[in-house]
Amino acid sequence: MKAKEKLTVLYKGLNNKWLEQFGFNLKDTTFDKIIDYMYTPKDSSSLAVTRILFGLAMLFDIPDERGGASMAKRWGDVKTCHFPLLPILQPMTLPYMALVYAAMWIGALGIMLGYKFRLTAPTFTICYWYLFLIDKSFWNNHSYLFGLVAILLSCTQADCYWSLDVYLDPSKKKHSVPYWNYFVLKYQFFILYFMAGMKKGTAEWLTGYSVQNLSEHWVFEPFKYFLTVPQTDYLVVHWFVFMFDLTVAIWMMWAYTRNVAMVFCALFHLMNSRLFMIGMFPWVCLATMPLFYPFNWPKRVAAFTKIVYIKIQDYTLAKMSDLKVICKCEVNDSELDTNTEEICKECGEVNDDIIEETLEELNAESNEICDDKNLNTSNENRKLDDVFEEDDGKSKDEKDNFNVDIKVCTEDSYCKKKMTIYLIAIYVFLQGFLPYSHFITKGYNNWTNGLYGYSWDMMVHSWDSNTVVVKLVDNNNKEEMYLDPQLYTLNDRWTRHGDMIYQYAQCIKKNLDMLEEKNCQETLSKNISIYVDVWCGMNGRFVQRMFDPKVDLLKATWSPFERVPYLMPLLDEAVHWRKDLDDIRNEVHSWSNNSDVVFFADFPGYHQEKFIPIDFKNVTLTVLEGTIVFEPEVAKNQIGHSYKLITGNKIKVNNGAFHKVLNIGNKPAFYMYTFYNATESNLGDKKSVKPKLPIFRELLRRFHGMILFANLIFTNIFQLFKFSQCN
């Protein structure tokens, strides 16, 4: 019985909240009432501010993160490898890519100004998603977010207030918009925060291994008065951020906690702008935070600003009266001189009545938010009554036809509303489903699930890339050669994804074929193989190979719906070493400021060939677990030797030379290199102190990028125009 009573109390509480939010009881919920709720008129000023700030942020984002200022490097060389999501999506040549960038920038400007919004917003959105989809190696979560916000804004009535469209055509001005215009944007940012928190609810994050030593940055200095660096990493960076991402959107939606949540959210994004190179992401989040405030907050701010201005003006005039300038407006004009008369006029105009009138004036627009649905219905009914009253001589058939027309019009409007809500429901479902859709898109999974960039797994994983070896084998001529992995690529994101590894091999093959056609001679046979060996560590684990170096990627198969066949498993059996690895790091770092250690793990039957740079001194190889064979490089007039090493054995390694490490045991082998970095030692005294807040330097860099972007746009479009004229 107690359980039933508790459920009844819970239901009543939930029903009261439901009634407070939606205006009807939980049991009375119907699809029609949901439509009415989503079309409830809301003040349009907050949506207009969001549109303006988002457009402004995109104007600076295009030359920077979208690569507008470096488009010649990104798209100018046909040999550069790109990684499109779909094979049919390919980048165009540079002059045409300049047109895409120009259209996108003009679209962003149109969004900000609200000019030709129905044309410029979709133009920006289409161009943005084209650039986004033709190269996965530049994907990240916030560039994905910008594309989603662009889609959502394009579907709203964000141009109906404070826009050039309204200025040029006042009939487009609307004091209210349907609530769904706000709902889709607020839901998108709720998903951003909430899913980021959900993705951090893993053992890797909650045990403090996902992000290490981040608290050494100066933004965490206030915490260092009562916490150590490891404690700050664990408690603030990991646990607090986990709870913050998971709940901050809820606190911002609740009126009682909104202001406090806004302060924490603003500090969070400002800290991120200093910690990471993530472009306009913190500023877009800051610009959209006010969406969680009342819809007419811009008008309230404007009213408050004007009242403050009037009070300052009144205070100034009062101070003037203290200087023996006495205003007596009731005295005859003949008793006042000219100067005093002018002051009296000014003094008489500023009083409490004026302030009250100003408040009423500025709040009038907000209070004018009316129920368009009821207003239009009443007007239609009034017009309908007038028609029948004025023309009683109409036949019954004519009146019936008129009623049918009105009914059809109403049904069409309802169908559009119904379709809109269906589309919103589909979008809501997709945004909740896609972050956990990795059981379908298996081909994009590696050690982590999903292609990084649409899962909101922000900063959940940190990577320590160590070595990338690209080997090309001419099978007919029995020749081997090694390629620089940076030769045809612009970043190293491709090295950690099975789909992009596969695309990279195809790109190398295409470039070799182009080179042979250009030189008109065959330097390599058609029977070639490409092998890629990537060594990296995730979240402070051992550095290990990610892909099987024995698989020829030109003959490999890849499918988005099947597991990557050449992906090597993550060595989870080494997790128990983590505490020991931390202790070893602390000990090695205590030797000197430039001593360091790198931990490696390898599979049975595999070997690693490694080169030790000349700047590394006192290099020692130590076996932590397993059995390996160490083979140093054979020099002239020297007999080659191999050394078998077991757990606990050490050996000195010569710098400036190659060596091999072979795992001859039946289990994975774990070993480490300790060394002294002479280069860092020499540079230690020469390091300049970087400013903590280089705001002016960043602004200068962005404006410089904008100038470079404009120059590239005009140069390439002129070349395109000149080429078309010649043809």
Image (cartoon, rainbow, N blue to C red):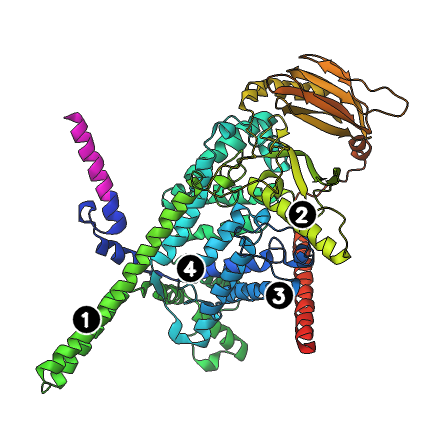
Main secondary structure type of the part rendered in magenta: helix
Density class for disc 1 (Cα within 10 Å; few <14, some 14-19, many ≥20) is: few
> Is 427 on the left-hand or right-hand side of 690?
left
Q: Which residues are magenta?
A: 1-16
Amino acid on which disc 4 is placed: Leu
Image quarter of residue 595: top right
The 10 Å Cα crowd at callout 3, few under 14, some 14 to 19, many 20 or more, is some
Residue 64 occupies quadrant = bottom right
Please identify, in this view, whether the residue under mark 1 or under mark 2 is nearer the observer: 2
Residue at which label 2 appears: 508
Q: Are marks 2 and 3 in contact (CB under 8 Å)?
A: no
| Foreground residue among 231 and 342 | 231
State which tag comes first along the sequence, 2 or 3: 3
Q: Position of residue 21 (x, y in %)?
A: 27, 49
Mark 4 vs mark 3, foreground winner is: 3
* Place of residue 601 in the rendered image (x, y in percent of width and height, measured from the top left): 63, 24
Residues at badges 4 and 1 in contact (C-beta under 8 Å)? no
Of residues 232 and 304, the one drawn nearer to the viewer in this rendering: 232
Disc 1 from disc 2: Cα separation: 64 Å
- Percent x, y for residue 244? 46, 37
Q: Residue furthest front?
A: 476
State yes or no: discs 3 and 1 in contact (Cβ < 8 Å). no
Q: Is residue 346 visible?
A: yes
Disc 2 and disc 4 in contact, CB within 8 angstroms? no
Q: Which residue is mark 1?
A: 407
- Which quadrant of the figure contains the C terminus? bottom right
Residue at image mark 4 = 47
Given residues 324 and 576, the one toward you in this image is: 576
CB-based contact (under 8 Å), mark 1 and mark 2: no
Q: Above or below — where is 400 with respect to 250? A: below
